[in-house]
Amino acid sequence: MKKVLITGGAGYIASHTNIELLKGEHELVLIDNFINSSAEALERVQELSGRSITFIKVDLLDSAALDSVFVQHPTIDSVIHFAALKAVGESVEKPLDYYTNNITGSLNLYSAMKKHDVRKIVFSSSATVYGDPDEIPVKEDAPIRATNPYGHTKAMMEQILMDTAKAEDWSVALLRYFNPVGAHDSGQIGEDPNYPNNLLPFVSQVAAGIREKVVIFGDDWDTPDGTGVRDYIHVTDLAKAHVKSLEKLANSSGIHIYNIGTGRGYSVLEMVKAFSEACGHKIPYEIGPRREGDIAEVTGNPAKAKTELGWQAELGLNEMVESAWKWQSQNPHGYNS
């Protein structure tokens, strides 16, 4: 079995990726510091997959502890790097925290990989690196011009990997996610934020009565209904893209950059309406002012991933909102329910 190191291994996207990897011939070594994840997710992944995983509590800022992981597991073949702070608004308020955690943590990881001659990595990047793109849907060759510290850290982490891949002959896949939503079809694993910074978890908590209403940031955008349009992708589809990326790196060196989205945009009002239908009652909302830094529309062109990885999104809006509601209704307080 190929042994894969997963950083941020107890997180939302990682948990779903773990499930997909465990369906194949992969052995997982997971590390996490539980800043924005839960140990319960690890237990549920093992229950759902019927397989055991190795977990070590490690912070990427602790380079000695990170090095010991590679020493303990000398057969690690590749890395999927999820671990990062990821809230755009918080990054604006606490830029030093984001640069320290995301950049220094990644440098420690890359250095440990070099020391132990691990040359394959799938990096969890973000469409935020594009900023406000000139063309929609955006392609992978669009200019990189992030507009907030979170986006800047992702762009920097990408650049460091690109430079390292050239110098060290690494195989690197940079996956630029659009907007991951939804949950595992069992309802047992899903998104469990300390505070919902993204639309669908917030809508879910309003539907469950945990929060009073959804605030929509502006209804005067240049879109069909005036609310912002984004490319949402089911987290299970996203997880499968990581499996395909590892397969790609097994047979191909160099840098490979992919948009991971559907290419189809949905507005905020469309998402709220769809969730209302999924949960069986109306979701209260109000229109607020535009949020600084927001843009009208961002969707991605996923054609390259289809051509080179043989991957494309299979799940649509109904599956996204229905699975999110199943997770929320079964776990009203997340993993602490």
Image (cartoon, grey):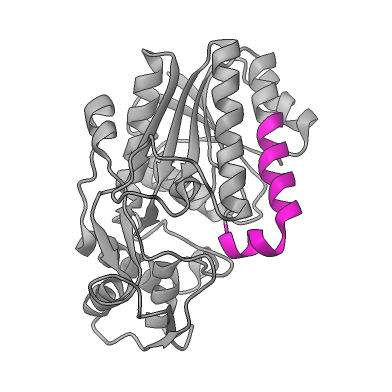
Q: Residue 44: x and y, percent?
A: 45, 51
Q: Is residue 92 above or below residue 76?
A: below
Observer able to see residue 108? yes
In depth, the one of 241 and 219 nearer the eye is 219
Residue appearing at x 26%, y 86% in the figure = 281
Left or right of 66, for residue 292: left
Left or right of 206, for residue 315: left
Residue appearing at x 51%, y 35% in the figure = 53
Q: Residue 116: x and y, percent?
A: 66, 14
Magenta stretch containing residue 275, yes or no?
no
Magenta stretch containing residue 92, yes or no?
yes
**Which SS does the magenta portion mostly show?**
helix
Please report the bounds of the magenta region as a residue range.
87-108
Q: Residue 35: x and y, percent?
A: 66, 55
Residue appearing at x 23%, y 36% in the figure = 303
Write down the quadrant of residue 154 in the picture.
top right
Write down the quadrant of residue 308 in the picture.
top left
Residue appearing at x 32%, y 49% in the figure = 135
Quarter of the picture containing the N terminus is top left
Observer able to see residue 76? no
In depth, the one of 32 and 267 nearer the eye is 267
Q: Is residue 10 above or below residue 81?
A: below
How many numbered discs?
A: 0
The residue at the far front in this view is: 134
Left or right of 146, for residue 324: left
Q: Residue 256: x and y, percent?
A: 40, 25
In depth, the one of 193 and 89 nearer the eye is 89
